[in-house]
Image (cartoon, helix red, strand yellow):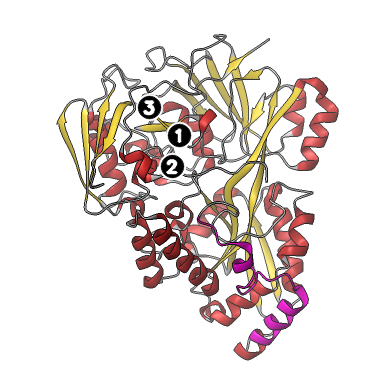
Amino acid sequence: MRSIIRSAAIVAIACMASTSAVAGSHSSCPEQGGTLKYGVKAEPPNYDMHGTNSYAIMHFVAQHYSTLLTFDWENFPKLEGDIAKSWEMADDGLSYTFKLHENVKFHDGTPLTSADVKASYERIAFPPEGVLSQRKALYGSLESVETPDDYTVVFKLNSPDAFMMDGFASPFNAIFSAKDLEKDMNWHKKNVNGTGPYKFVEHVKGESYIAERYEDFHHGDNCLDRTEGYRIKNLVEPLVGGQIMAEWRATAPPEVKSLTEQMGDDYTNQAKTLMTLWVVSLNSETEAFKDVRVRQALNLCIDRHGGLPKLAKITFTAPRPSGYLLYDTKYALPDDELYQLVGFGPDAEANRAKAKELLKEAGYEGLKFTYSNRAVAHPYDHIAIWLMSEWKKCGLNPEMITNPTSKFVTIRKEGGFDATIDWAPSFLPDPTLMHFKYLSRDVNPSNYSRATDRELDALFDAQKGEVDFEKRKAIVHEFEKKALEQAYVLPVTYTDRVVSLHKSVKGYVIANSHILNNTFRGIYLED
């Protein structure tokens, strides 16, 4: 594994107050000007940062917005301020107080105040009817947001929350203008008005996304005159041909080889293990998948130990098994415990024999089911072909149905599948983020298995409120084992991320998530 990071400890945060919001990697511009041209393989469903998990919204839209806190990318996961100039947590962990910069303006010229922070976080934590907040469940401990004055915000909690401080740096928690929200709580689905480094200019769906430098940006490290994002199907041709200079998601091993050969010294890249887990979600409303034996059988059929090293040579997946928590991080199950669980042992033949036994016992030998796939080559097709082969070795009869992204997303959301490729993106290896996806469907709408498990919900809340590391870890392991054994969502593996760049792109620092560090702050072009 190329890089593993650690989550900030709550005990350290308790006594911390930052007085510098421009420390670390966010520095002044060595060179100013030029147009950054980049490629994205997906289309954002809308512009609402609070209501989606799409990486495309991060790669296109994040540049327009600011968050309360962000990270020092050279010293990740050290926190630093974005619109906050200082912050502190009360000794009892029940309140967080932020002092805001007073020179921040929205792109329409409106000054940012504490009212905007309050309106944004209330929309995230307490969305009114008709407003989708994908991360509402992460803020269950938030009781109220108070604004003693125009540049002070106080978050009041009903119980301590081990994740809360890091949560203020979530890249999805964009600060919207209260004035815009007063017009329409869903205004940001179709409109953009932030305080970020680059202003929205034009979006031609399926083609291009244009932004320009915001002259009044409060940090001043927006070094480019303009950014131009282009929808691409493949990476190699547009990068070699000069139509783009970067692609922020990931580059597969064969693509890295081709780019190196064709571009020579003009090509460079950065690499890290990505905190996105590829999973298969099994629809709990499919009759066969109501039986835990059938779900476990599908998991047992997958030879992770033999297949993942081979898969990693042709696409950007990690070469080893993992549970829901990123392997080798401080909350993850040790390998010797993980490999004792159903579907994770190294003996493929024994696993398949057990799978066939369970299918026979449940009355589902030769089960036919649909597998919904996204029409994107890496890593979707490669994972799909491998899984089809693995399931057929157990006598199963999967049918792969591949659709363009927009239709795939609709099918996944509406439950029109038996099994679907899915993913669980995180920006920290924290169990609150990495277990969030597996909460009951009515708690978290992004649990596309549509399962309900109140025991998991209770364990999640318990770990979230436990600030003692060892006690929290024990609860997290209980959640992990129970969820893996229930097998509504089958982990495939994590992602090995390589970001490809033209050598002229400078100042970029890769993060352990493709939803992080996408505002283009600090990026400049060198001739």
- Residue 304 drawn at (x, y percent): 71, 64
Q: Which residue is mark 3?
A: 82
User: Disc 3 residue type?
Assistant: Asp
Please name the residue that numbered disc 2 is placed on: 8
- Which residue is found at the position 70% from the left and 73% from the top? 301
Question: Which residue position holds label 1?
Answer: 78
Residue that appears at 36% across and 24% down: 195
Q: Residue 60, image x and y in percent?
A: 51, 32
Residue 334 lies in the magenta-colored region: yes
Task: Tell whether label 1 touches label 2 (CB within 8 Å).
Answer: yes
SS for callout 3: loop
Quadrant (top left/top right/bottom left/bottom right) for the C terminus: top right
Sequence-first disc among 2 and 1: 2
The nearer-to-camera label among 1 and 3 is: 1
**Residue 456, which numbered label?**
none
Residue 452 seen from this side: yes
User: What residue is drawn where x is 74% and y is 79%?
Assistant: 350
Does residue 439 sit above or below 454 in this rendering?
above
Residue 436: where, in percent of width, then height?
43, 57
Q: What whole-number distance in Å separates the C-alpha atoms at marks 2 and 1?
A: 7 Å
Q: Give, as a three-letter code, the residue at label 2.
A: Ala
The magenta segment is: 331-358
What kind of residue is marked 1?
Answer: Lys
Q: Residue furthest right?
A: 261
